[in-house]
Amino acid sequence: MQTLTSAQVTDLKAKLFRGFADPSRLSILNALRKGSLTVGKIVKATNLSQSNASNHLACLRDCGLVTRSQKGNFVYYQLSDERVAALLNLADELLADSAKGVYECTRYEVSETEK
Amino acid sequence: MQTLTSAQVTDLKAKLFRGFADPSRLSILNALRKGSLTVGKIVKATNLSQSNASNHLACLRDCGLVTRSQKGNFVYYQLSDERVAALLNLADELLADSAKGVYECTRYEVSETEK
DNA sequence: ACAGTGTATCAGTAATTAATGATATAGTGA
DNA sequence: TCACTATATCATTAATTACTGATACACTGT
């Protein structure tokens, strides 16, 4: 068991947050809030392409946010810890209060697929 | 006051998390946990270059995580909400439990500046 | 108005990242 | 073994991002 430098801890924390920092991954995490799902169900729920979803799932696993369990031909993913959902909830609350400000921020660009 | 689509909410949430998802910004946020600081103090605390710190501060402001207040020649930054610190705390806890797994993950690369 | 200090912005570059389509792997049942 | 389904990986491309050094702006005191 090795002790980490504070810079290493910071890198790990950044990595953890990076898992949350992409709309595709957030939509996956959101779908998993209700429980574990197969990759196929995740693809349907999120409208991501299969390979893209698979890549993001690998990323989420890499960040420690989800775990994987194989059952026959299917692979189930689920949130790795209650606190993953708790982080999502906290972010929801924070956004609910500050969304207006962020939304109006000049740098923010809404994706073109939305009206 | 406009209602946001769920995709817009997802984009905003991703943007919020992106603020946390970089080691430089995390070290800034960490420095600000104890209270507000001038840019100069932040630069010293983080070892970032002045322009780099300034860019990250703009980013953090853009993500809604910090606020800015000017006093004479100095600019003070501070966390915009208690919940920003709460998110950092939650991430700390999550990491404390799962650090081992994340640390051992094959994809993770420790920056070369560390031994 | 000027010099000095603190902060922000700009242009350029290198590196990282997300997405796609095609292909590979692994499990299932006949 | 074979055909089939589910998932993962690969190669490529386009887009985004972090950083640096130089410069600009803003405030202060003289």
Image (tube, coloured by chain):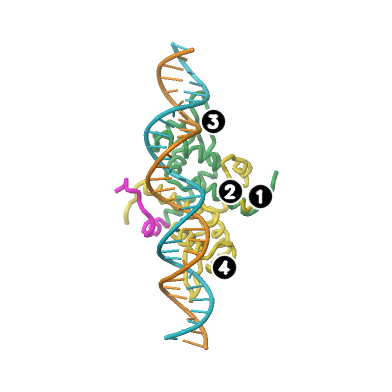
Chain colours: A yellow, B green, C orange, D cyan
Q: Which residue, given by chain and number where applicable, does mark 3 sit on?
A: B69
Single out the residue that lies furthest toward the left: B115
Residue occupying image coordinates x 54% and y 36%: B67
Residue occupying image coordinates x 52% and y 59%: A82
Q: Amino acid at mark 4?
A: Lys
Q: Position of residue A101 (x, y in %)?
A: 61, 40
Q: Which residue, given by chain and number where applicable, does mark 2 sit on?
A: B12
Chain holding disc 3: B
Q: Amino acid at mark 3?
A: Ser
The answer to whether the residues at label 4 and label 3 have Cβ atoms under 8 Å apart is no
Residue occupying image coordinates x 49% and y 74%: A71
Q: Name the mark on residue B4.
A: 1
The answer to whether the residues at label 2 and label 1 have Cβ atoms under 8 Å apart is yes
**Which residue is more in the foreground, B85 or B25?**
B25
| Mark-to-mark CA distance, 3 and 2 | 24 Å
Q: What predominant SS class does the magenta segment belong to? A: loop
Q: Could you tell me which secondary element the residue under label 3 belongs to?
A: strand
Magenta extent? B98-115
| Mark-to-mark CA distance, 1 and 4 | 25 Å
